[in-house]
Image (tube, rainbow, N blue to C red):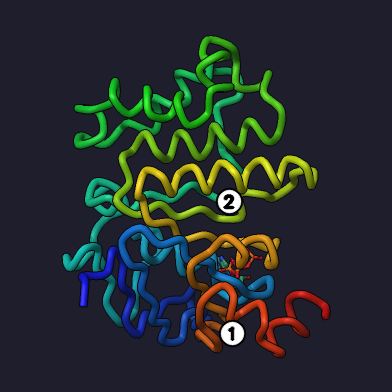
């Protein structure tokens, strides 16, 4: 069996007295796109924040290509290669597109290779190359999401996590964004993606996990999940 790109085993975390993750296990294999589905408050963002080291794990283990990353400070986790594009794009709108991309290359490993990486990002998202010297505020919502994904790529992720990248986008832009995410797959970077557009994300994903009350209640291939009765009733309204 190949080594997982990312593996969480029995992960527990919370805030104060509130236990939010109640023993979550999941894995992402190299090259896979894995979707994380769940209602508001299920703990999806908390899971990403725990893997990122922003929330301290209270139990369990997280490994990136076989190396433990739980307990590391957030910048060490990013340096190890788990890079998260946060919910809400958190771009610097007054800065140029190029400057926003450079912000992503802040870790040592990434900075050493930024010239190569920025060319890869420009190839993936030509609109960013065309407008590189313009302020990020001049981009449409969909283009800003591409910039957010591009910035995350600048950190040279070994695993990329996207937290609701389609939030606030018009449907046509959601389609574009999903095209962009498919393009990232060409770079062979495994992706963990949280999405409310359940049908779209499961159509794209190799596999998915459903998180309910801090536990994984269902997992399978994207296709299996789309056909699952519980998932259809709860998340697709079918
Ligand atoms: P959403 O789709 O709304 O982002 P989610 O599945 O990502 O939902 P989380 O954001 O992980 O859910 O939140 C899980 C629970 O943890 C919620 O009940 C939330 O109120 C609580 N929570 C999140 N952040 C904090 C915090 N910093 N302090 C205390 N409680 C928090």
Q: Residue 18 appears at what percent x and percent y?
A: 53, 81
Relative image position of residue 175 (x, y in whole percent): 70, 46
Q: Which residue is mark 1?
A: 213
Q: Which mark is residue 103?
A: none
Tell whether circle 1 marks a residue whose Cβ is less than 8 angstroms from ligand 1.
no
- Tag 1's secondary structure? loop
Question: Image point 45% across, 19% down: which residue?
Answer: 99
Asked if the residue at label 2 sits under 8 Å from ligand 1, the reply is yes
Residue 138 shown left or right of residue 92 in the figure? right
Provide the residue designation for mark 2: 87
Residue 158, position in %: x, y? 29, 51
Depicted 51 relative to depicted 151: above or below: below
**Front residue of 4 and 47:** 4
Quadrant location of residue 138? top right
**Residue at coordinates 37% horizontally, 43% vertically from top-left?**
187
Residue at 33% x, 67% y: name it.
29
Q: How many marks?
A: 2
Name the residue: 59% across, 85% down: 213
Image quadrant in which the C terminus is located: bottom right
**Badges 1 and 2: C-beta atoms under 8 Å apart?**
no
Residue 121 position, x and y percent, is 43, 29
Left of 177 or right of it: where is 232?
right
Mark 2, other Cα within 10 Å: few <14 / some 14–19 / many ≥20:
some
Task: Say whether disc 1 or disc 2 marks the residue closer to the N-terminus.
Answer: 2
* Quadrant position of the N terminus in the picture: bottom left
Q: Is residue 114 above or below residue 14?
A: above
Element type where label 2 sits in the image: loop
Q: Quadrant of residue 231?
A: bottom right
Q: Nearer the viewer, residue 6 or 238?
A: 238
């Amino acid at each position: 069996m190949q080594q997982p790109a990312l593996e969480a085993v029995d992960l527990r975390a919370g805030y104060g007295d509130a236990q939010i993750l109640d023993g979550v296990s999941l894995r992402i294999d190299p090259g896979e796109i894995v979707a994380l589905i769940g209602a508001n408050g299920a703990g999806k963002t908390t899971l990403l924040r725990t893997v990122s080291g922003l929330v301290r794990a209270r139990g369990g283990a997280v490994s990136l290509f076989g190396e433990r990353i739980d307990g590391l400070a957030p910048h060490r986790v990013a340096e190890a290669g788990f890079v998260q594009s946060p919910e809400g794009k958190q771009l610097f709108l007054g800065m140029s597109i190029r400057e926003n991309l450079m912000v992503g290359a802040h870790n040592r490993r990434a900075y050493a290779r930024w010239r190569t990486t920025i060319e890869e990002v420009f190839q993936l998202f030509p609109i960013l190359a065309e407008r590189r010297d313009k302020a990020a505020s001049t981009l449409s919502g969909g283009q800003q999401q591409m910039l957010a994904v591009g910035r995350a790529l600048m950190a040279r992720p070994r695993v990329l996590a996207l937290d609701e990248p389609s939030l606030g986008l018009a449907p046509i832009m959601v389609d574009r964004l999903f095209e962009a995410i498919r393009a990232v797959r060409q770079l062979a970077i495994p992706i963990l993606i949280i999405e409310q557009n359940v049908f779209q994300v499961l159509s794209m994903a190799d596999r998915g996990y459903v998180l309910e009350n801090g536990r994984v209640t269902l997992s399978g291939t994207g296709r299996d999940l789309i056909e699952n009765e519980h998932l259809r009733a709860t998340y697709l309204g079918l």
